[in-house]
Image: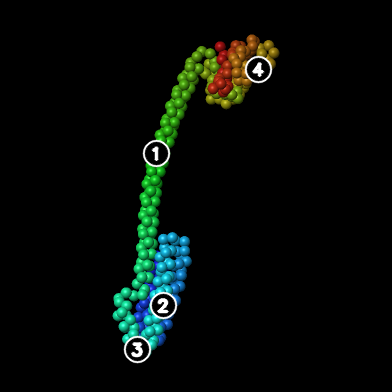
Amino acid sequence: MVDLIHTVQFDTVRLQADLRVYLVTGFPDTIKPYEASAARLRADAAKLAEKTADDSEHRPLVVTSLSEIETGIAGFDGVVKLRGAPDGHAAVVALSQNRGPRSFVDPLLETLGKMDNIERERLAKREEAAQEAFHSAVFYGIAAAVVGLIVVTLFAISLFRGIRTRARDADLLAEQHVLLSATLTSIGDAVIATDATGKVTFLNPVAEKLTGWSQGEARDQLLAQVFNIVNESTRAPVENPAFRALKEGVIVGLANHTILISKDGVERPIDDSAAPISSGGVVSGGGTRLP
């Protein structure tokens, strides 16, 4: 908008300059540049009117400008005609002296100047609003970054505490496991422990001696292979009480006249019992005790 206003201002000044060239020289060829400047001023003024058709602040000034342009060009055309008459130069000088220093286009330039001031004020306000928006964006961006940093920090603290708690729990569990193993190792009865699938996970030294299996050899072996029991009279395999304990979750005793056949073939009469090992109400393994 500002550029278009400046264009109309330039057209106005150029029109006045082209008129003066003709008035001074009187050459007919200098009339054409004046006429071209007048046409250009009218065309640019029409563009300005179209551009400001919906602008309530500019519209009254544009209407005034269009009127001033037509009045100014009409006055200039009259001076051109006067200059072309005999003794035209003297007539134009006399007209200028009677008119005074004010030009026909001076009111137009004043009106265009008012429009220019309005646009400059608008640009200043938009610039101020843009600066405020920028500073607000920077402030809220920094605030968001600080909040994000706080959230990340709190998350890191929470995660660290959780890891530290789990580490303590793991240490406690490991300590309890060591304590349990030490207890089972030191008791006088033979103890065999399995997981939920019936695979051996632990033998104490007494159980190693009775079964002929070492802890390393027996680990992950099926209980029936390590704890090989049969009926003393019929030599038929006896149902292992540990399997029933795993399936039913109860303590199960062994029938009489049962013998244990060790890995090296030694037979020993036994009297054992089996009990489930529970974790959170779920059977996770079993244990067999041989008194």
Residue assigned mark 4: 239
Helix or strand or loop: what does disc 3 sit on?
Answer: loop
Which residue corresponds to mark 3?
87
Disc 4 and disc 2: Cα gap in Å?
A: 127 Å
> Label 1: which residue?
150
Tag 4 secondary structure:
loop
Quarter location, residue 284: top right
Name the foreground residue: 231 vs 78.
78
Q: Position of residue 59 (x, y in %)?
A: 43, 63
Q: Residue at x 56, y 15 (%)?
A: 289
| Count of marks, rendered view | 4
Q: Quadrant of the C terminus?
A: top right
User: What residue is disc 2 on?
Assistant: 74
Residue 285, located in which quarter of the rendered image?
top right
In terms of sequence position, does the residue under pointer 1 or pointer 3 come before the other?
A: 3
Judged from the image, the secondary structure of the residue bearing numbered disc 1 is helix
Say what amino acid the circle numbered 3 marks: Asp
Residue 177 in view here = yes
Find residue 258 and report its horizontal and vertical position in percent: 64, 12
